[in-house]
Amino acid sequence: MKKTYRIKKNEEFQDVFKNGKSFANRQLVIYFLDNPKQPHFRIGLSVSKKIGNAVVRNRVKRYLRQAFLELKEQVDPSFDIVIIARVPTKEMDYHQVKKSLKHVLSKTELLKRS
């Protein structure tokens, strides 16, 4: 995932948290904020130390980035999205993470209907 597709600054994270909407399932929480000025969506990932050590946290982040890369064409481009991983994600493999992400996105207005 290119750096232009990522949210890095704390102010941008806080803006999404305060002004955006949220939806969750057992594994993931998604906050999203409409930002029609931008040409593509941006994602920010938050994986707590409760999930595990750095190796586990980085694996979860890699899985989420790759799942977004594969769903890129289906995601509405005008949103800033923050994903918070919950503890059950540490035991999930890539396909389970992708399925969970797709479930959460389909419950929101972020996935285009196909």
Image (tube, rainbow, N blue to C red):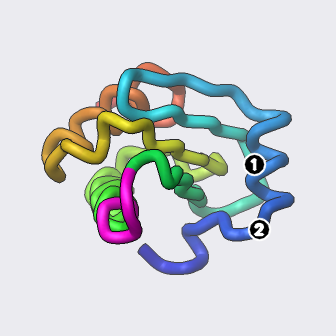
Is-magenta flag for residue 54? Answer: yes
Q: Which residue is mark 2?
A: 9
Please give the name of the residue rendered at 37% of the width and 23% of the height, measured from the top-left corner. Answer: 26
Of the numbered discs 2 and 1, the one sitting upstream in the chain is 2
Pair 2/1: label in front: 2
Residue 53: x and y in percent read: 38, 63
Closest to the observer, 66 or 90: 90
Q: Give x and y (percent) for residue 32.
A: 64, 38
Tell me the tag on residue 35.
1
Q: Amino acid at mark 1?
A: Asn
Image quadrant where one finds the C terminus: top left
Which residue lies at the image location 45% right of the left edge and 43% below the top edge? 85
Residue drawn at the location 68% of the way across and 69% of the way down: 8
- Against 28, residue 76 (above or below) is below
Main secondary structure type of the part rendered in magenta: helix
Give the magenta part as a residue range: 52-57
Residue 55 position (above or below residue 14): below
Residue at disc 2, secondary structure: loop
Query: Which residue sits furthest bottom?
Result: 3
Amino acid type, label 2: Lys
Residue plotted at (74% across, 53% down): 13
Is the C-beta separation of discs 2 and 1 under 8 Å? Answer: no
